[in-house]
Amino acid sequence: MRTVLVVEDEPRIAGLVRDYLEHAGFAVLRAGDGRGAIVLARTRRPDAVILDLGLPTLDGLDVLRDLRRDSNVPIVILTARGDETDRITGLELGADDYVVKPFSPKELVARVRAVLRRAETPPSPETRVVVGDLELDVPRRRVLAGGRTIALTPTEFELLLTLAREPGRVWTRGQLLDVLRGSSFETYERAIDGHVRNLRRKLEPVPAEPRYVRTVYGVGYALAEPDAPRGAEA
Ligand code: CA
């Protein structure tokens, strides 16, 4: 049974989310504040985290930053309606998805399932994708770039894998969001920019001069083809 840590200070919301998750077959851990959340995440190693951003003792964004220092656990953040800044910051800090309050618990459970699916080994026979000196070990979700091992979140890995399967193909942000979300949810193009920024920070020897993930101005992103000159376009 997979375990989800629910970090939410409002007991009514936390209880509702727990009920829906348990009904969907998950075991649920609860934390009502930021510090408690970090302790539980470290000691109990949940399979996914639902993290409210408005928390006592330690802000949700600080919790996120702290968890991402040493963990790639899938994280879905809960944000207040209209609080776009927090949402973008959360995605930039490595959250895998977000849900805006007030939310449908059913949709939240669907999002948790989606980030867990991304984090797990796909059933496809694909094992390795190699583009130049970039190597993706799909079953192990590992990335080698120029001989360096890169640790990525499930979302970053999925994003890179999508680009790497078709080097040179140009993707719009909307298309990438569809791939990451299974296309049925609200689109949020700047979220892709946040994930790409995080991906580059980890992957690129010089993030300001990307050699792997190129920006295609006015359109979106593409993985550089191994024979094409790199760096100049982005
Ligand atoms: Ca709250």
Image (cartoon, rainbow, N blue to C red):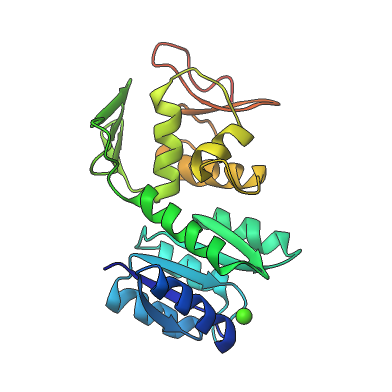
* In the image, farthest residue toward the right: 82
Residue at point 43%, 35% (across, down): 160
**Res. 133 in view:** no
Q: Position of residue 155 (x, y in %)?
A: 45, 47
**Res. 108 in view:** yes
Q: Position of residue 116 (x, y in %)?
A: 38, 55
Q: Quadrant of residue 36?
A: bottom left
Drawn side of residue 174 relative to residue 128, left or right: right
* In the image, farthest residue toward the front: 23
Q: Position of residue 26 (x, y in %)?
A: 35, 70
Above or below residue 35? Residue 179 is: above
Circle count: 0
Residue at point 36%, 81% (across, down): 39
Drawn side of residue 52 relative to residue 227, left or right: right
Give the quarter of the figure containing the C terminus: top right
Judging depth in this view, the residue of 140 and 184 nearest the camera is: 184
Judging depth in this view, the residue of 38 and 69 nearest the camera is: 38
Give the quarter of the figure containing the N terminus: bottom left
Judging depth in this view, the residue of 22 and 52 nearest the camera is: 22
Residue at point 45%, 84% (across, down): 31
Q: Quadrant of ligand 1?
A: bottom right
Residue at point 65%, 45% (across, down): 187
Above or below residue 213? Residue 112 is: below
Q: Position of residue 9 (x, y in %)?
A: 56, 85
Judging depth in this view, the residue of 191 and 232 nearest the camera is: 191
